[in-house]
Image (cartoon, helix red, strand yellow):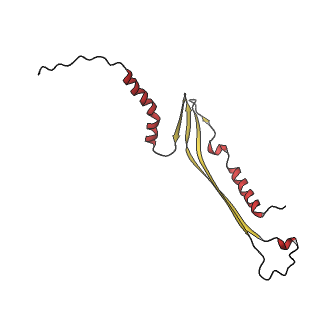
Amino acid sequence: MNEHPIETLMKTAMDSIQKMINVNTVIGDPVETPTGSVIIPVSRVSCGFAAGGSEFGPKDGDEGEDSSSEESSKMPFGGGSGGGVSVKPVGFLVVSNNQIRLLPVEGNVLADRLIDEMPNLMDKVSNLLNKKKTPREPIYDDRF
């Protein structure tokens, strides 16, 4: 059985999109710095696809043709397809010295930095609270 023309349009568009997108589009190739850190780009990929078509029936007055032949039973087809891909950088994964950080490309950098530093801040506060306080001598006031 022959393929319908819309199937050919869809396969062509999907093959083209598949050639453009692969796993390296989302998670890029790692780059090693001279200090030993590894930087990995991360992107958001969106794609869309649409296809459509229509078969046109015989014109009025064409019913007199022999409808038993295959050529006369095959209706003319008109259609089209299209697709699109959007790649937006999200950030960079930085792997260095037992630490992994995500550096976002956009957003509230100050808030992200505070969130990143929160574990260090909590450790410092915890250390301050756990230190033994040196006893102080009471302060006497001679007014009473």
In this rendering, would 139 be left or right of 110? left
Depicted 62 relative to depicted 139: above or below: below
Q: x, y percentage for residue 43?
A: 59, 45
Q: In the image shown, does 115 or 63 lie closer to the viewer?
A: 63
Q: x, y percentage for residue 118?
A: 44, 33
Q: In the image shown, does 34 or 57 lie closer to the viewer?
A: 57
Q: Identify the image quadrant of residue 114.
A: top left
Q: Residue at x 78, y 77 (%)?
A: 58
Q: In the image shown, does 13 or 89 lie closer to the viewer?
A: 13
Q: x, y percentage for residue 55?
A: 75, 70
Q: Residue at x 79, y 83 (%)?
A: 61
Q: x, y percentage for residue 127?
A: 40, 23
Q: Residue at x 56, y 46 (%)?
A: 89
Label total for image: 0
Outermost residue to the bottom: 61
Q: Identify the image quadrant of residue 140.
A: top left
Quadrant of the rendering where the N terminus is positioned:
bottom right
Q: In the image shown, does 79 or 140 lie closer to the viewer?
A: 140
Q: Residue at x 55, y 45 (%)?
A: 90
Q: Identify the image quadrant of residue 54.
A: bottom right
Depicted 125 relative to depicted 29: above or below: above
Depicted 65 relative to depicted 74: above or below: below
Quadrant of the rendering where the C terminus is positioned:
top left
